[in-house]
Amino acid sequence: MSKIRFVGLDVHADTIAVGVAEPNGEVRSLGIIPNRLETIRKLMAKLGPATDLKVCYEAGPTGYVLYWQLTALGIACQVIAPTLVPVKAGDRVKTDRRDAVKLARSYRAGDLTAVWVPDADHEALRDLVRAREDARQDQHRARHRLSKFLLRHGRRPPEGVKKSWTLKHLTWIKEQVHFEQPALEFTLLDYVHEVDHMAERIQRLEKAITEAIQKAPPAMRAVVEALQALRGVALITAVTVVAELGSLSRFPSPRQLMGYSGLVSSEFSSGGRIQRGGITKTGNAHLRRVIVESAWAYQYRPWVGGFLLKRQQGLDQQVKDIAWKAQWRLHTRYKKLLAAGKKKPQIVTAVGRELLGFIWAIAVRTEAQFHTERKAA
């Protein structure tokens, strides 16, 4: 008879509700404990040897600290995707204790889906990349506030200033836009200062990302460099892909990677009726955003030059061949969908979905080649 105890934890910032599925079939609540390492260690020691325990909890704002604590104790732990936890249609009562018991029961039944847990290097890099993304969003808000402030007061750029937020545009705002009222002048200076501050913040974070990649593990650095062979995939995009996905070899096929990104079509089919809708938008939203941004580059004819040529220098020839094949296929795909009357956002989404296949091919090849060379050395 199996001696494995399945433990479900409903984790919050200060407390953890504990449920356990016993080997004899009983499922019960063990109450609520403080979310502190020493308390968790004492509880696990009471439940039995580490080899006889399997623990799970839902992914959430508390991150992976508990996972790292439990694995350091030698206890098998999995972090569960919250949206894939089975829910009974008629269940209208939700408490922390019930959630912990439900997790333990479902974990024993094999009904839960675990998420990928990054190691310390990936987690650090991912936080840095997301900090830059937050800064970009803050910059967009700051620019929006300034532009609407100027619009409200009838300040429009002169004829020679055609594009917003260029050096010429910012120089016009700082040198030629003034107000008689001190309150408006102070408001303008504050908005301009915030725009400049956001630009400086992004530069600092991008410099930090460049330095972090130079100090990253060799396997991670090799994949980042190889992905930049693709058109539309520069350093920040490549780092974002690696930080969000980790090792792409964990996906057995590019189709699974596409599904993980949420760029595949939803489907509502039953009987003889087949109905497909918009993309699912499940999975990793950060990955989906950078992939769609990169896909816009494939509206232009295939070409290698400028920054792309510099990024490809020193890379494996087969990686460059995959990148060239991606240019032809994705550009052809873009033109065909455009000729069929599809809207550009739909076209770019479809192109981005296929771009993930080429990203998978390059990353898996690079990872395999790196491990082969390491064994040979």
Image: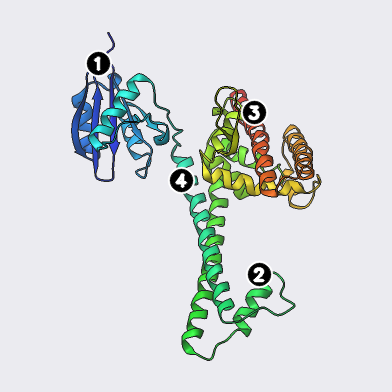
- The residue under the point 68% across, 35% down is 358
Going by the numbered disc 3, the residue's amino acid type is Gln
Q: Nearer the viewer, residue 230 or 220?
A: 230
Residue 10: where, in percent of width, then height?
28, 36
Residue 316: where, in percent of width, then height?
72, 35
User: Mark 3 = which residue?
Assistant: 369
Q: Secondary structure at mark 3?
A: helix
- How far separated are the C-alphas under marks 1 and 3? 47 Å
Label 4 or label 3, whichever lies nearer to me, is 4
The quarter in which the C terminus is drawn is top right
Displayed quadrant of residue 93:
top left
User: Mark 4 = which residue?
Assistant: 124
Q: Are marks 4 and 1 in contact (CB under 8 Å)?
A: no
Is tag 2's residue or tag 3's residue first in the polypeptide sequence?
2
The quarter in which the N terminus is drawn is top left
User: Mark 2 = which residue?
Assistant: 164
In the displayed structure, 342 sits above or below 203; it is above
Q: Nearer the viewer, residue 311 or 151?
A: 151
